[in-house]
Image: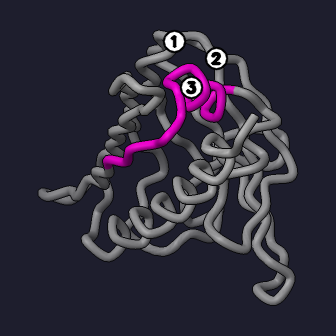
Amino acid sequence: MPDQTFDVEVAREFDAPIERVWRAWTTPDDLREWWGPHGFTCPRAEADVRPGGAIVVTMRAPAEWGGSEHHSRWDITDAVAPTLLRYVHRFCDAEGRPISAAEAGVPPGVPDENHHEVVLADLGDGRTLLEMVEHGYFTADARDLSANGLEQCLEKMASLVERPA
């Protein structure tokens, strides 16, 4: 483990009620719509949202990038609807068994597992603030790559939750 680690910290306001943003994080149909950066899809999402439960997602690269699939398991440590979700992110195989970051084919500097925290706040007038931290990247480059991907995911989430009902 390196002496210094780097955290991803993002904040985003959504023009959507807090309950809608929470559902986007915790409902398989919603997760499939936004998980993965632009051009990536999420063909699988499973959610057992409770401490001790897990969210399992599969991210598929676009065909022009080879169409590879990357599986992740988010082992939930805290879930307080609709305001708090804490989990340990782990790479996994298609069956959900943990694998190393190297086995998952991700760039150097990304840990095998890291702690994530999502905090939602009701801003009133049907608006929600999301603040998220991903802890423990080994390099600034790995942190920046993850932050870029997360920002793209949140753009896709905004398109989902801000859609008229």
The numbered disc on residue 49 is: 2
What's the residue at 51%, 12% (across, down)? 81
Q: Picture coordinates of residue 142 (x, y %)?
A: 37, 70
What's the residue at 58%, 34% (across, down)? 74
Q: Amino acid at mark 2?
A: Val
- Give the residue at mark 3: 22
Q: Amino acid at mark 3?
A: Trp
**Which region of the structure is painted magenta?**
11-26
The reply to whether the magenta stretch includes residue 24 is yes
What's the residue at 72%, 74% (across, down)? 39
Does the CB distance between marks 2 and 1 fall below 8 Å? yes
For the residue pair 18 and 34, the one nearer the viewer reads as 18
The numbered disc on residue 163 is: none
Where's the C terminus, which quadrant? top right
For the residue pair 54 and 109, the one nearer the viewer reads as 54
Crowding near pointer 2: few (<14 within 10 Å), some, many (20+)?
A: many
Q: Of label 3 and label 1, which has the lower sequence position?
A: 3
